[in-house]
Every structure is written in structure tokens, then in C-alpha cells.
Image (cartoon, helix red, strand yellow):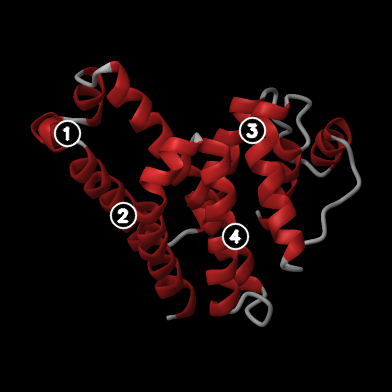
Amino acid sequence: MKKEILYLTEYLAKSDNAHVSAFYAVLVQTLATFELYTPTKFTQPQIGALMMRQGLCAPSSYDVGVKALDAALEQLLPLPLQEAKKSLFITLLNANFPKKKSFLSVSLELFLSQLEPVEKSIYENLLAYVSGLNRALALFFVLGKEEASSFTPERLVAFGEALHVKLLELVFNEEENALLSQGLKELLGVYLSLYGKHLYM
């Protein structure tokens, strides 16, 4: 499973479409910077071929790859961590969209259908940030479970903070960045505590 996760991460990072591969390229680069992972020199088609040779399913598209990666990561996260992540995201939405709380209490679908265009844009950016952060921390968690000596609490914090900065640049424009960076830094702290608790308990 770990091998599949790493293959999928690199597969997504090496997409020809720079827009879609940007986050995964940053993720792989950040892992390499902290000497937590050494990227291969394989191209995306070569990674796909390697996966198939090893009996793994190579993604047919970017979206399929993301879904496969998310599914593989979720499978290795403890259930309490998965539930805490979902609960935290709902809390985040309630805090950022107080007037839409009642819709959110019914369902996420109803909540989304009630968002104004500007609110929808804010939601999508928040989702991109939180999803990216969660994928990165989940990957750290999965790798850290097997190599505890390299994946220390200090490295978790440093890794999270480095990715936070890069995610802000990738997801938000300068104005949004200035408005949201402090709040998102606090949110990062909550996520780091959450993953750290389950990784090092």
C-alpha cells in the first residue's frame, strides 16, 4: 500500500498539466527537502507502467489518480483520525459561513447549493487548502508509521509549516493570503496536533 501511495503521488506530480500537478510536485519536493523521500527519475508514463507491472492499477486520468490516492491514504488512517478530520472541516465551514449553518446541518449538498458565487469561491479555496494539507499530513502519517526515527514530531511541524506556506501561494491570491494566512496558520496547528496525536500516541 505504501508503494502504491508513493507511486500515485509521483504520478500526479509528474503530470504534463502544470496546473494540476503543482500541489503534488510541491509535496514531493517538500518531502525531498526534509530528506523524507527521494523522488524517482521516472516519467509519468514510466510510473504508470511500473505500477501495472507490479499488479497495481495505473490511473487513467488525473481525477482517477487523486481518488485512488485519497482512498489509499484513508485506508491507512485510524478511524478516529478520519472522523476528527471530518468534524474539524464542518467546524471550519460553520465558522466561515455562519449564515449558512442551518443548511450545513441538513447536508453538505444543501449547504453548497445555497452558496453565493463569492462564497462558493471562498469554499473552493478553503477546500483546496484543507484537502492539500490533509493529503500531505496523511502521507507523512503513513510514512511515519513505518519509519518513526526519521518522521519525528519536530519534522512533522516543520513539514506542515513548509507546506502551509506553499499551499497559501498555490491556492490564494495576495489579498486573500493577507486576510487568511493567520487564521489558516492556526488551523494548521490544529491539524498538526490531530495527526501528531495519532502518530505519536
Q: Earlier in the sequence, mark 2 or mark 3?
A: 3
Q: Position of residue 108 (x, y in %)?
A: 24, 30
Q: Which residue is mark 1?
A: 104
What amino acid is found at the position of numbered circle 1 in the picture?
A: Leu
For the N terminus, the image quarter is bottom right
How far apart marks 1 and 2 lie (CA) works out to 17 Å
Tell me the residue at 50%/51% (across/down): 133
Q: Which residue is mark 2?
A: 83
- Decide if residue 123 is on the left or right side of residue 135: left
Foreground: disc 2 or disc 4: 4
Q: Which residue is mark 4?
A: 162
Q: Which residue is mark 3?
A: 65
Q: Position of residue 191 (x, y in %)?
A: 40, 61
Tell me the residue at 70%/48% (across/down): 4
Q: Which is nearer the eye, 113 or 97?
A: 97
SS category of the residue bearing label 3: helix
Q: Which is nearer the eye, 55 or 20?
A: 20
Do tag 1 and tag 3 residues touch (Cβ < 8 Å)?
A: no
- Decide if residue 66 is on the left or right side of residue 193: right
Foreground: disc 1 or disc 4: 4
What amino acid is found at the position of numbered circle 4 in the picture?
A: Ala
SS category of the residue bearing label 4: helix
